[in-house]
Amino acid sequence: ATDFGMDTALRELGLHTINNGTSTGSNWFSNGEEISSYSPVDGELIGKVKTTTKEDYEKVMQSATLAFKSWRTKPAPLRGEIVRQFGEKLRELKEPLGKLVSYEMGKSYQEGLGEVQEMIDICDFAVGLSRQLHGLTMHSERPGHRMYEQYHPLGVVGIISAFNFPVAVWAWNTALAWICGDVCVWKPSEKTPLCGVACQNIIAQVLKDNDLPEGISCLINGDYRVGEMMTTDKRIPLVSATGSTRMGKIVAKTVGERLGKSLLELGGNNAIIVTPDADIKMTVIGAVFGAVGTAGQRCTSTRRLIIHESIYDQVKNAVVDAYDQLRIGNPLDENNHVGPLIDTDAVNGYQNALEKVVQEGGKVVVEGGVLSGEGYESGCYVKPAIAEADNSFEIVQHETFAPVLYLLKYSGDVENAIDTQNGVAQGLSSAIMTNNLREAERFLSHAGSDCGIANVNIGTSGAEIGGAFGGEKETGGGRESGSDAWKVYMRRQTNTINYTTELPLAQGIKFDL
Ligand code: NAD
């Protein structure tokens, strides 16, 4: 990967000393066992970080709690100014950070850059929002009284993130949490720890330049055991967790037991409905990008194509032809479409899905397989595969985090396709390809898609930060990013002020002394 300028990128991100466990960062620095980060791109060791011990965690929490006391009193627009500066630093470091995302996680360099762009976009959004943390005013039923509501900072926000968006998900949370007056403790995925250190280095510099405590942004490292330090910690009023449904169920229970709040962004099982009125060319591009982009490792990846029987063969053939054109290889090389899976466990999950779909009666129409030989030494490169299947198959009901696309056939009305689309446990992203207004509106109506995201004539993946992002059912119900998602990072207070010399009670209750 040196050919692609990785050494320079690591240097620009302050990670050149990471191999021996030292770095320019401060409060992320931990003393536990080492995690080695190997690139799925070429199997090389990128660097090592140490995990957070209980003692380290206590220190982090003390610095975060202390930082919160001063940060919450800074006017929100001035907090916005810090987020603006952070966005500026990200603009400067977009290329090296995008490269690191690509090299440590395995997504294409273009998608790595896109992820950093999302961070920049959410910073811009948060800066504007820092002047718009509005509450409502209401009319009181009592004479001479005024009522209104306001939003106050919540405290320390815990962030647990997944490997597949190793930097953007953190920024979606922190940019909003910071302008809301919260401080953050972040546990990145143990599979992408260097992306975490790189981000911490960037924000630490911004905080230092402004004489602000680094406790405003804290990093902890390690696997679920380090995550549990936060989920069980009463000092953390909100835990925002992104990852598998399996993880979300545990986090929801643990945080719920102490009546904390959790914001859950979990797995998807996303479908595109292709009706007889679809534009086939657009459908193919949307479906193929959705299924093979990030090697099928997006929460919004297209897993199912629900195609009307009248155009089934036409769509199937066009998608199969498009798969023939795919180039699989080093994601830093911009000629390639598909990079590696994150690790060999993910490869096993992919192989298992392909075996299971056949066992359950499905038919493979684009063969899968693990690639070996020159350029594929990491053992993480697989061929995107397509199988004809039925929605009732157990494996189709399950999110396989890999490039496996299932073709499902429907007949009759679009209602039947919507029933199939909704007939899974997850509810993240959905799409319909149609030029028929009735079908499109039906899909978007109260009787339509049950997902948090429902698109017309675009695929399932690739959300913009302006909208609220998240999904229903086993996707966890959380919303992040745009719209009014900021409200979850604040506590709401209703205020009633009496400016008379009387004390009338609500509901007309009499109480005379
Ligand atoms: P994962 O569930 O294995 O891990 C996610 C994070 O949770 C990691 O940081 C992990 O250390 C931590 N964790 C795991 N168990 C925990 C526990 N008991 N307590 C506290 N922390 C715990 O997921 P992954 O393999 O990294 O990511 C892939 C999954 O993430 C997919 O299911 C994907 O759909 C989902 N995802 C969802 C969204 C979304 O916005 N809905 C976005 C990205 C990824």
Image (cartoon, rainbow, N blue to C red):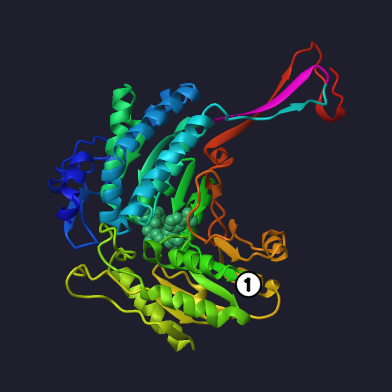
Count of residue discs: 1
Question: Is residue 148 one of those drawn in magenta?
Answer: yes
> Residue 87: x percent and y percent?
38, 34
* Image position, residue 276 (x, y; %): 64, 74
Residue 390 in view of the camera: no
> In the drawing, does residue 292 fall left or right of residue 490?
left
Depth check, front residue: 386 or 199 = 386
Q: In the shown orientation, is residue 8 left or right of residue 241?
A: left
Frontmost residue, 506 versus 405: 405
Toward the top, the furthest residue is: 501
Name the chief secondary structure element in magenta.
Answer: strand
- Res. 124 in view: yes
Q: What residue type is labelled 1?
A: Thr
Q: Give the range drawn in magenta.
A: 143-152
The residue at 29%/58% (across/down) is: 334
From the top left corner, tell me how far across and down residue 342 is, in percent: 30, 63
Left or right: where 184 falls relative to 376 = right
| 132 w.r.t. 429: above or below | above
Taking the image as shown, residue 446 lies to the left or right of residue 490, namely right
Image quadrant holding the N terminus, namely bottom left
Q: Quadrant of residue 400?
A: bottom left
The residue pinned by badge 1 equals 275
Q: Please rate how many residues cluster around mark 1, counting C-alpha atoms within 10 Å: few if below 14, some from 14 to 19, many from 20.
A: many
Quadrant where the C terminus lies? top right
Q: Nearer the viewer, residue 314 or 287?
A: 314
Q: Classify mark 1: helix, strand or loop.
A: loop
Q: Residue at x 68, y 72 (%)?
A: 414
Q: Is residue 325 magenta?
A: no
